[in-house]
């Protein structure tokens, strides 16, 4: 979900920051940017938290049994201009290196994933 189409909701934030690391904590519902609390809205935290809570409920898992649920994302965004006579005004490329982790008292589950996303800003005439 983070590296899919829903990422576009936080595109302006990622472009403005250019690079860094987001740490999303789904137990405390907090976001940190480069280790510092991030006080602006970050849509992906809301989206993933809602999905996580629903998935736990659907599988009859009590959230208190989850000790840690995080997604840590290192990202780099680059912007290039579109071709002069093209309707594409700019192209945003975001490289993501993600690590998700869920910890219970019995086991830790984690996944690493890397992905590059490309978004085209088109002049809508």
Image: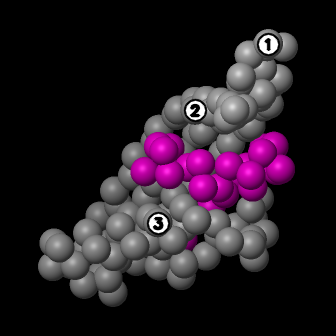
Q: Residues within 10 Å of mark 2 (few under 14, many from 20)?
A: some
Residue at 47% of width from left, 43% of height from top?
A: 4
Nearer to us in this view, 122 or 52: 122
Residue at 79% of width from left, 13% of height from top?
A: 85
**Residue receiving disc 3:** 47
Dividing the picture into quadrants, the one containing residue 58 is bottom left
Q: Earlier in the sequence, mark 2 or mark 1?
A: 1
Q: CA distance from mark 2 to mark 3?
A: 19 Å
Q: CA distance from mark 2 to mark 1?
A: 24 Å
Q: Is residue 17 magenta?
A: yes
Nearer to us in this view, 118 or 17: 118
**Residue receiving disc 2:** 117
Q: Earlier in the sequence, mark 1 or mark 3?
A: 3
Question: x%, y% of residue 44?
Answer: 54, 61
> Which span is picked out in magenta?
1-25
| Local secondary structure at mark 2 | strand
Question: x%, y% of residue 104?
Answer: 32, 72
Dividing the picture into quadrants, the one containing residue 121 is top right
Nearest-to-viewer mark from 2 and 1:
1
- CB under 8 Å between discs 2 and 1: no
Q: CA distance from mark 1 to mark 3?
A: 37 Å
The numbered mark at residue 85 is: 1
Q: Is residue 112 magenta?
A: no
Nearer to us in this view, 17 or 33: 17
Question: x%, y% of residue 11?
Answer: 68, 49
Residue at 35% of width from left, 67% of height from top?
A: 51
Q: Quadrant of the C terminus?
A: top right
């Amino acid at each position: 979900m983070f590296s899919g189409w829903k990422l576009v909701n936080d595109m302006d934030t990622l472009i403005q920051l250019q690079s860094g690391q987001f740490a999303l904590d789904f137990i405390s519902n907090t976001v940190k940017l480069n280790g510092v609390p991030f006080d602006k809205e970050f849509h992906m935290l809301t989206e993933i938290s809602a999905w996580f809570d629903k998935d736990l409920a659907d599988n009859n898992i009590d959230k208190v049994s989850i000790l840690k649920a995080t997604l840590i994302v290192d990202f780099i965004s680059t912007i290039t201009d579109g071709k002069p006579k093209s309707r594409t005004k700019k192209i945003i490329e975001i490289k993501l290196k993600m690590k998700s982790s869920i910890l219970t008292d019995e086991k830790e589950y984690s996944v690493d994933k890397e992905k590059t996303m490309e978004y085209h800003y088109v002049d809508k005439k």
